[in-house]
Image (cartoon, rainbow, N blue to C red):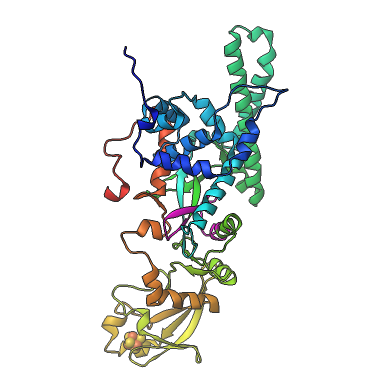
Amino acid sequence: MSWRAVDVEKLISEDHPARAIWTLVGRLDLSPFYRAIESSAEEGGRPAFDPQLLISLWVYAYSQGIGSAREVARRCEHDPAFQWLTGLMEVNYHTLADFRVEKQAELDELFTQVLAALSEEGLITLEQVTQDGTKIKALASGRSYHQEETIREHLQQARQRVAAMGDPRNDGSSPKIKQAQARARRQQQERLENALEELQKLQARKTGEKAKREVRVSTSDPQARVMKQSDKSFALSYNAQISTDAAHGVIVGVAVTAEANDCEQLLPAVDRLEQRLNKRPKQMVADRGYTTRKNIEKMAGRQIDFLGSMRYVPRGANLPNQLPPSAFIYQPERDRCVCPQGKILHRQRQRNVGHGMTYHVYEARFEDCQTCSLKPECCPENKKHGRSVVQLEESPLVMAFRKKMASEEAQQKRPCQRTRSASRGKPCLGHRPFSWWLNRIRNQSRPGFRPAPGARNSPHRR
Ligand code: SF4
């Protein structure tokens, strides 16, 4: 064992990010945090940690991809940056975890303050905001996913166990063990009651007895839903929605939802930005998942320039061995199409393909195509009918959107491949997509987690 003097100020360099985080947090209004720990002459209390310290610790930990309170507490013992922030004090992981859970509203307000400060510095302009979602797997096993009957059975058993807690015949263990067992049983009962409540909410959305019976929820994480993952598998997950100011890649809005689809998340994201920053984004960029007719019309109604990606023709219309539909000219005044050979394609029928979309099918006469010299390129496989093309029925706003997206200007505003993640709505922290950080934080929270060999590489390099 040896003793040595440590100069805390020299633990980290002058330009270390921990110093910048400490200074930034010190500039924020932390009065709601201080009010909660103030003591009076009449009422004393235990000494409390300075909120600036706890907030700075968490901000720095997140910037390093650490989301576990135990890991932060461990780092405080040996990591110079964490030691500098704490001034070599020991911080218990309970303190860290409780602070994060209990101060959610205050931390949310702090996030608004940080964004306001960045906005004042001109780092948030909302000239262009990208929106995207990423699925985060819940820490719930598929085996906890049950129907109503099973949940009710488990709940009844849990209630019986809680009721039996006061029975003197079960008083064999030490008081500490009894206390822990009682807490675990009560928590299990609470979880099952929450699951039942959530299940009833989902049942209310269903019609038909069979559909209601088949509804299932997880008893360990009732709010999680089964969602399709990027690898095409299904897992109990949440959908994290992230809005990023494209100018400097700053995340300006985050929400977690149990809705698997992104299409209903665009307007709430705009509302969150307006509410938090008191400002409306000028342009929103999102991918195909958000580009619905409803969103296009709503964004136009709010006078926000929306850039998205929309399929123009139905699947299968652009067959590789056929002339493309763009070779046919549509004449709206006469509601017909003209083929490259000057033959007329008349409207024959219409197809409703869901999501409010209707396609009108225009078909050439069989006799015209049979004798046509272009048939081998136009429709070589048509043996019984002439060539057909489809026209999509659209509202004027959607037509204008399609026209805009086909323009060179809109194509230029689309992100280049290098910054694809950040500007197409895949917000990045550093050079890594946000989903990478979220998964890292989630994995690190698992007991016994060890990064896989090569896990330090970003997904871009895999
Ligand atoms: S095959 Fe029919 S539709 Fe195609 S170019 Fe010839 S006439 Fe026109």
Please state which of residues 353 and 4 is positioned toward the viewer in this rendering: 4
State left or right for residue 147 relative to residue 61. Answer: right
Residue 300 position (above or below residue 247) = below
Q: Choose top left, top right, bottom left or bottom right for residue 278.
A: bottom right
Please state which of residues 447 and 85 is positioned toward the viewer in this rendering: 85
State left or right for residue 208 relative to residue 121. Answer: right
Q: Choose top left, top right, bottom left or bottom right for residue 168.
A: top right
Q: Residue at x 43, y 69 (%)?
A: 311
x then y, percent, for residue 415:
36, 64
x then y, percent, for residue 459:
31, 48
x then y, percent, for residue 226:
50, 45
Q: Residue at x 36, y 30 (%)?
A: 80
Q: Is residue 51 visible?
A: yes
Question: Which segment did they paint magenta?
Answer: 244-269
In which of the image's four quarters is ligand 1 placed?
Answer: bottom left
Please state which of residues 40 and 93 is positioned toward the viewer in this rendering: 40
Q: Residue at x 46, y 75 (%)?
A: 402
Q: Choose top left, top right, bottom left or bottom right for residue 51.
A: top right
Q: Quadrant of the N terminus?
A: top left
